Image (cartoon, grey):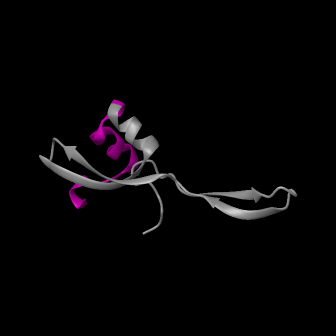
Amino acid sequence: MSRRCQLTGKKANNAFSVSHSHRRTKRLQNVNLQTKRIWWSEGNRWVKLKISTKAIKTLETKGLVAMAKEAGLNLNHY
C-alpha cells in the first residue's frame, strides 16, 4: 500500500536535498503516517487506519464519521 493518509489523502512531496556546496539532489518528503486504532461509536467497534498526524489533530475536532464521509471512506471495510 502506498504511503498515503486514508482520511486526508496526503502523500509524499518531491523536494531537493541541498548540500553545503548547494548541489541539489532529488528526495521525497514523506507524510508522518501513524497506524492508529480509533473508536467508531456508530459501528460500536475499533477501526484501524493509517493516518497522518495532521489528520489525528483534525479528527479530534471534526470526528471520525465526518472525515470518513469527506474522504468517501466506508468504515465497514477497516
Left or right relative to 46: residue 66: right
Task: From the viewer's side, name the closer residue of 32 and 62.
Answer: 32
Q: Residue 27 occupies which quadrant of the picture?
A: bottom right
Q: Is residue 74 visible?
A: no
Q: Quadrant of the N terminus?
A: bottom left
Left or right relative to 7: residue 27: right
User: Magenta span has 71?
Assistant: yes
Left or right relative to 33: residue 68: left
Residue farthest toward the left in the current orientation of the protein: 44
Left or right relative to 39: residue 73: right
Q: Is residue 4 above or below residue 41?
A: below
Q: Position of residue 52 (x, y in %)?
A: 44, 49
Which residue: 88% across, 58% down?
A: 21
Q: Position of residue 38 (x, y in %)?
A: 25, 47
The magenta segment is: 61-78
Q: Position of residue 3 (x, y in %)?
A: 48, 62
Q: Is residue 78 visible?
A: yes
Q: Residue 62 occupies which quadrant of the picture?
A: top left
Which residue: 56% across, 57% down?
A: 30
